[in-house]
Image (cartoon, rainbow, N blue to C red):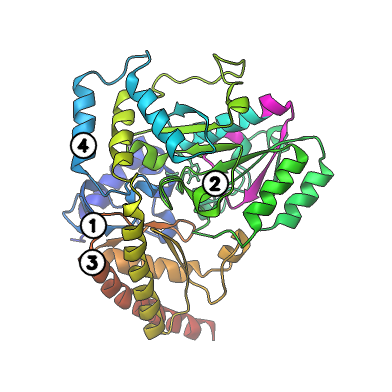
Amino acid sequence: TSRYARSIEMHQRACQVMPGGVSSPVRSFKSVGREPVTVKSGQGAMVTDVDGNAYIDYIGSYGPLILGHANDTVLAAITKAASRGSSFGMPTEAEYQLAVKVIEAVPSIEMVRFVNSGTEATMSALRVARAATGRSKIIKCIGCYHGHHDSLLVEAGSGCATQGVPSSPGVPSDTAANTLSVPYNDAQALEAVLDANAGQIAAFILEPIAGNMGLVLPREGYLAKVRDLCTKHGVVLIFDEVMTGFRVAYGGAQAIHQIKPDLTCLGKILGGGVPCAAYGGKRELMQHVAPQGKMYQAGTLSGNPLAMAAGLATLEQLQDGKAYELLDATSHSLALGLELQAAKAGVPIQINRVGSMISCFFTSEPVHSFEDTCRCDTKRFTTFFNAMLDQGVMLPPSQFETWFVSLAHDRQAIERTIEAAGIAFQAVAESAGSEKISQS
Ligand code: KE4
């Protein structure tokens, strides 16, 4: 029987009771032509599936697990908090403690509100911008993904791009009409839209370092230009750092690029793998949020004790900044190894990397925008993904996702990954050869 027999059987059963058998489309493995692997457990850099196969994991829950799976300090903190009760519907001290940590970590944040997902964080940040400016229109970047609420499911990245449905059915056209989109890394396009809609734009939201089209870095000067344009037009600049916050640096992308947005969205690492996200920024904006102000936003489990405990235990292990030097060194050696192996196999790739976020694009051209990522060879990516999976390396199952290295990925894990990549790039070269034959 196949090494994935139990996963296949589990998937067939799951599909009877959940759409696509998953709780999120990105987990479906549909785009890489196979049933998803059902995971049984994780420890450090490893996950084990229901068939007993072990994998070096580069999904890491799509970002939260920068410390690796089942980090004992985080687990102890969650267990301790849970023993005192999992949720109250009343304020607790832990919310205050994590709020203080967030404000210390991200100087542009003067006040913060906890929510339960990145989607809620970006949705609420947009509402603050609309409440504060009295304007309705917003601008986002093509290929950036900010969660699945209506205003931002327009030309979106991540699973939307993977499925080739960037603008989802079910979003009313007059809602979508309030969302304008521009290419990422193109300040001129942003300026043109701002000029054409003078006085009507409430916010410009972007991932300062884009992680949902695969990893795409801001061009030199782009973020500074964006900051100036938003200031000039009285537009609220929102940095969606749900993925990059505490990931690329303790202070996020805004710390690396020294740009101050008006509002910031955080998530993923903030909860250490337990549902938790947040939005925050200038006091003059956040004072609009109920009950201080009139802009309503609420949540039964917002700021819940388990997430606060997991978040505090996670940030405590990151705040001295040493983690980022180690993550960068580990990820750098992985990137070098991938480039060497691809060159040996004669497979052109482009690697984009910022610290422990890495993307391997199957193209010979540099990748600076969503348009560039769409020129990548997703067939080759699929061959590579499956060859890596069969050798015990779990990559995100899409060209439009970034890989995540954790502090638990040690030298041995990186070396084994590079070794597996050698075989996988060979498989791509051989399949590419067969493509040429079939095309000729
Ligand atoms: P959630 O609602 O999934 O917690 O966060 C939405 C979100 C917002 N902003 C950014 C920059 C994000 O990356 C995300 C979520 N990222 C995807 C991975 N590309 C989550 C994976 C999934 O959808 O299951």
Q: Quadrant of residue 315?
A: top left
Who is closer to the viewer here, 234 or 89? Answer: 234
Q: Quadrant of the N terminus?
A: bottom left
Q: Secondary structure at mark 3?
A: helix
**Is the residue marked 2 within 8 Å of ligand 1, measured from its CB?**
yes
Q: Which mark is residue 4?
A: 1
**Is the residue marked 4 within 8 Å of ligand 1, measured from its CB?**
no
Residue tagged 2: 145
Residue interval drawn in magenta: 130-150
Residue tagged 3: 411
Residues at marks 2 and 3, CA–CA distance in whole angstroms: 32 Å
> Crowding near pointer 3: few (<14 within 10 Å), some, many (20+)?
few
x and y percent of residue 173 in the render?
70, 36
Lower position in the chain sequence, tag 2 or tag 3 = 2
- Give the residue drawn at x 36%, y 44%: 64
Lower position in the chain sequence, tag 2 or tag 4 = 4
> Crowding near pointer 1: few (<14 within 10 Å), some, many (20+)?
some
Q: Is residue 366 left or right of residue 424?
A: right
